Amino acid sequence: MPVANPVADAVSSLLKPLGFRRKSSSWYLENDETVLIVNVQRSQFGPQYYLNFSVVIRAISTVPQPKEYHGDIRFRLEETLPAHSRELCKKLLNLEYPLSDDERSLRLVELIKRHGLRLLLTCNSEAGLKEALESKSLPDWTFSSAARAHLVERVTRASI
């Protein structure tokens, strides 16, 4: 019997043991400084999905229960991948692509672990966020202007 949503099931199998809690189609990991969010978004045009990653910085957020789109840092899984892996990612997230649910899950979890989740977990604190901004491990466009200003101010204040 096929799984109802193999993409969400794969994400859940990876994130739940790490302490993420599921709310609807998103998983949250919260601490005093940040809220990390992984969201499974279904395409309006068919059984294709997107994996959205988001970081909410509590010091500048005004939203008590943030959603993925409230993130101060936002990116999609395929944006974190090397060029040769992007097409594979699209196939894995397209349920019309012929692949068993087990194979899809196994390969998707590996991509998420190696790329999107690795980056997301480095953003679990303001120190990690500052490092990601300074080292350019995340492109500038992933940071909102408010996040960039907040982190630059923190760096400047720390160096005084």
Image (tube, rainbow, N blue to C red):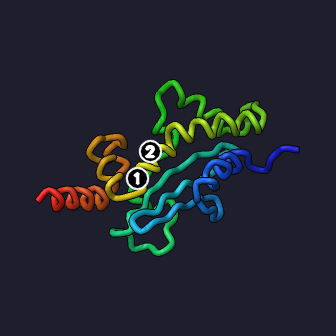
Q: In the image, residue 86 lies at what x, y percent?
A: 53, 31
Identify the amino acid type marked 1: Cys
Identify the amino acid type marked 2: Leu
Instruction: Mark 2 and mark 1 in contact? Answer it, CB < 8 Å.
Output: yes
Estimate how packed mark 1 is, as few (under 14), some (14 to 19) or many (20 or more) residues with alpha carbons within 10 Å.
many
Q: Is residue 111 above or below residue 75?
A: above
Report the number of numbered marks.
2
Q: Residue at x 57, y 47 (%)?
A: 51
Q: Residue at x 60, y 29 (%)?
A: 88
Q: Residue furthest top?
A: 84
Q: Is residue 91 above or below residue 73?
A: above
Task: Tell me the element at label 2.
Answer: helix
Task: Tell me the element at label 1.
Answer: loop
Q: Quadrant of the N terminus?
A: top right
Q: In the image, residue 34 lies at what x, y percent?
A: 42, 63
Position of residue 71 in the picture relative to residue 47 (left or right):
left
Position of residue 119 in the picture relative to residue 111 (left or right):
left
Q: In the image, residue 44 lies at what x, y percent?
A: 64, 50
Position of residue 88 in the picture relative to residue 117 (left or right):
right
Q: In the image, residue 49 lies at what x, y percent?
A: 63, 45
- Using the numbered discs, state the Cα–Cα distance from disc 2 to disc 1 in whole angstroms: 7 Å
Q: Which residue is mark 2?
A: 119
Q: Residue at x 26, y 62 (%)?
A: 150
Q: Is residue 60 above or below residue 134?
A: below
Q: Residue furthest right?
A: 1
